[in-house]
Image (spheres, rainbow, N blue to C red):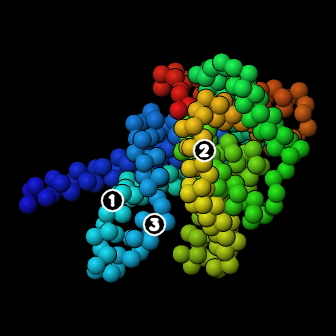
Amino acid sequence: MAHNVEDRTVEWLELLRTYGYGLCMGTADALPGVSGGTVALLLGFYGRLIAAITALTPGRALAVLRGYDRDRRGRARTALVEMDLEFLVPLGVGMVTAVALIAATVSALADSHPIALFGFFTGLIAASAVVLFRSLTFASPAHVLAACAGTVLALLVASNVVQLPGSGPVLIFFAGALAISAMILPGVSGALILILLDQYVFLSSELSAFLDSLRAFLTGNAASAAVLEPGTTVAVFVAGGFVGLLTIARIVRRALEAHRELTLLFLVGLIAGSIPAPLYNIDEGHAWTTEVVALAGAWALVGALALFVLDFLAGGFDPE
């Protein structure tokens, strides 16, 4: 009996530790310039994360759903073990918890202190580009071209010179697919992708509104209609993320396996080209006076210093 209690205690501690991993990874991915994939590397579970995500296939999901059939329960149990859900579920819950908390904070700060918030984000992104480029080498003209291609593409998207096809739900779905895919790549932040697509503040506000309205609905203080609109946005984003994990994330992983250096340089180039993206959010509501420039610059310096300190404490970031 004592042995069973001890085993259950160990299992709960393992779940709590994985939940804590999810909190750390979700916090990193909710901030542009800091990568959840890098956190996974630093905490030592990146290999397990990639293996579990790769194991998420339609075939295994179908095997689990067919577990109601007694003759197929063995295969269903095997599929569950292969997908490592005992790891992915608490990790995902931790990530969702962190993202929800940060989304509420970002939504509030975007209204009350936009210059400080987006200046800080600019510094984070700029510093992350510096530390990641520092870990890569430009050994050939192809390497330079890959980095320049990523940088130019991000600059064109951030400035709306190049616009992605679709809008509304289509763009949100696409943003979810790209952002979730970026979350598993060391060095690339899901939040950065959302800032590049000009969806970060909107989606943070929608998630915060959804959670607030859901809480009010459950306590009887709001109608279901209040939950529906932001809930639909969140559902479309999550659906895009799920599709992205099964498609885009796998494509990028294969590109890394086939052309590691070129792919990494292109991805870090995207980060470098995204540096001015947060500043467009300041530009929407403020003229670039000397005071605004100084305040944004000061907070950018704070963001850069925070990233450099994290880089120092981690012993240096490696994008792969």
| Residue drawn where x is 33% and y is 81% of the image | 69
Question: First in sequence: mark 1 or mark 2?
Answer: 1
Which residue is at the front of the view, 113 or 165?
Answer: 165
- Label 2 SS: helix
The residue where tag 3 is placed is 59
Quarter holding residue 289: top right
Distance from the alpha carbon under mark 1 to that under mark 2: 25 Å
Residue 252: give its label.
Answer: 2
Depth check, mark 1 against mark 2: the one in front is 2
Q: Measured from the top left, where is residue 63 in percent x and y? A: 40, 71
Circles 3, 1 touching at the beta carbon (< 8 Å): no
The image shows residue 240, relative to residue 153, as above or below, that is below
Which residue is at the front of the view, 27 or 243?
Answer: 243
Which residue is at the front of the view, 313 or 162?
Answer: 162
Local crowd size for mark 2, using a 10 Å CA cut-off: few (<14), some (14–19), many (≥20): some
Question: First in sequence: mark 3 or mark 1?
Answer: 3
| Residue drawn where x is 44% and y is 55% of the image | 55
The image shows residue 112, relative to residue 299, as above or below, that is below
The residue where tag 1 is placed is 81
Q: Measured from the top left, where is residue 115 in percent x and y? A: 77, 38
Question: First in sequence: mark 3 or mark 2?
Answer: 3
Residue 289: give its label.
Answer: none
| Residue drawn where x is 56% and y is 55% of the image | 245
- Label 1 SS: helix
Using the rendered image of the protein, determine whether residue 199 is visible from the camera's viewpoint: yes
Amino acid identity at mark 1: Val
Distance from the alpha carbon under mark 3 to that under mark 2: 21 Å
